Image (tube, coloured by chain):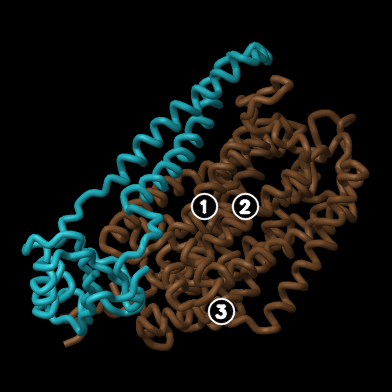
Chain colours: A brown, B cyan
Amino acid sequence: MVMKKLFDHGEPSYEQVNQDVIKSLIETGPKYWMLLATTVGITVVCFIVPWMYQIHMGVGVAGMNRNAVWGTYLSNFIFWIGLSHSGTLLSAVLHITQSDWRKSIYRSAEAMTLFSLMVAATFVMVHVGRLWFIHWSFPIPNPMGLWPNFRSPIMFDVMAITTYLTASSIFIYMGSVPDFAAVRDYSSGLRRRIYTVLSFGWRGTSKEWHTLGWAYTFFAVLVIPLAVSVHSIVSWDFALSTVPGLHQTIFAPYFVCGAIYSGTAGIVTVMYCLRRFLGFERYIGKIHVDYLGKLLIALSMIWTYINIMELFTGWYSGSSAEIEFLKFRLFGFYAPMYWEMILFCAFVPLLMLFKSVRLNWNRMLVISILINIGMLSERFIIVSTSLPRKLLPDSYGFYFPSPAEISITVGSFAMFATLFLIFIKVFPAVSIYEVKETLNPLRRAEKT
Amino acid sequence: MDITGTFQYEEDAISAAQGLHAAGIKNVSLMSPIPMHAAEKALGLGKSNVRKFTLIGAILGGLGGFSMCVATALVFIMPTGGRAIIALPPYLLITYETTILIGVLSTLAGFFLVAKLPAWKNRPYRVEANVNRFVVAVESPSSNEVKKAEQIIRGAGALGIEQTGDTL
């Protein structure tokens, strides 16, 4: 097998890796602050203010109604949970399989997981309306003696997301400890004190490396099945109901595949930004976009197959309720959105079969964004075309998002961007020590 | 007082560390900017005890999760459509999640305990060990060990030796 080059512009030296990565943390220009102010502003105006308004007025300000009791908040929740899937999962799988190309992109991909999960968890709080009772969903004995019902898929969700958020946070933090120590050594004053605490006094002794290696591998092994379980469980929020269009056995693999698909597209978008705005062209190169492109093609084909199967099983059931649901989805009010999703997620990715497309960062950026627009539509369609078409015509209804819901959706992207902008100034966005592991080893044999 | 020796090559640093061990000098540490798998073998670092934390944590997490579900169901009995009060399929899902949750947390605890971190006291350290050099350090050697340690480190090809070095 021919080993592909990891670095497009030649191997950097060990010292250069430290300098390049730490520079991205320490040197902060006015453009960064302007961008951060903009994202914070959009988050406040589009997310926080409408949410506070909703808390004040009640969930009636959202477009949800008696028939369509779930709406954009839930579809956004699925979207963000989905987007979280590739970071930690891909990082863990590639760690276990010892794939060197993972090493310069995994830190930011894991951060994407973490922040997507945070945004997703926020949507649960927005959706429930009475936020101040949300602790009732946790297994904490309370004065009313109300304990959660663990037979409910909603409780599966609470446990799965809490576990995934905890595991992902620990996974990214533990992998960053040696790099925090590198930043500590380059810093002075308050920054040095902060990174001394963050690095736990790491010195890079053989014992520390050895223990980290074992612990990190165990984290990876535990996180892989966890990630698969999380989106399967999210799918059961829907599939364990009897609503036509939701009561599907294929939903768990469908959701997991869709999650990895949108997450991988998200990684391409994030990597483009890291290259473009943090100057990581040397570390994130053709090999990464090429492999991610190939992964996207494979995922697109699996996703398309499952979509066809979803339609087929609905039609083959012969159930009038299922047929009515299918007609509503394919030719009803939201049909243009459905066909847009098919175009963006089933056909557009086929362009990546051409190497000239796959190796071009600008084209890949456009495709990755289109895929995620398609995936956002997919989640919206799942919710908005099923609940308004239940088993009996008298339960038929219609759902359209209200201005508050649309605004909060827009604000969620700004919230994610804000969290990511903060991340790149606290965590080394590219793993220093793992990139060094891919360089020419500091051994006598290799040097002489 | 501590002694630190800085090396350009991995093999030299490993050979120095092995020599110090062979000479019966204690409190020797070998620092590097990347994991050194060869050093782990040479210094006899076998299977880490972290795995025991993971296993025990995962087992306790699984048992705890299942017990939590059963106890909740028995404390607050909710008959639903003739379904079992202690329903295995949904409870196994919760059990699975808590197995992983406690497994991860105990692995984290295991990492801290085995690696002896966080460590805030002053210990021998050189910043080059986090960039592109290998550093062998001897912490608080006795007066008759100092000369012997310096000889071994120099003999292994150290770029420089310091008697105090930076401390962390």
Is A155 on the left or on the right of A57, as rendered? left
Residue A211 image position (x, y, % from top left):
31, 54
Q: Which tag, 3 or 2, sits closer to the chain's start? A: 3
SS under mark 2: helix
Label 3 with label 2: CB-CB less than 8 Å: no
Label 3 with label 1: CB-CB less than 8 Å: no
Asked where in the image residue B149 lies, by quadrant, the reply is bottom left
Give the Cα separation between the discs numbered 2 and 1. Answer: 9 Å
| Mark 2, residue position | A117
The answer to whether dots 3 and 1 both sit on one chain is yes
Q: Chain of mark 2?
A: A
Give the Cα separation between the discs numbered 3 and 2. Answer: 27 Å
| Mark 1, residue position | A168
Residue A332 image position (x, y, % from top left):
83, 49
The answer to whether dots 2 and 1 both sit on one chain is yes
Q: Which mark is residue A26?
A: 3
Between A164 and A400, the residue placed more toward the observer is A164
Disc 1 residue type (three-letter): Ser
Between B76 and A336, the residue placed more toward the observer is B76
Mark 3 vs mark 2, foreground winner is 3
Q: Which mark is residue B134?
A: none
Disc 2 residue type (three-letter): Leu
SS under mark 3: helix
Give the Cα separation between the discs numbered 3 and 1. Answer: 25 Å
Q: Chain of mark 3?
A: A
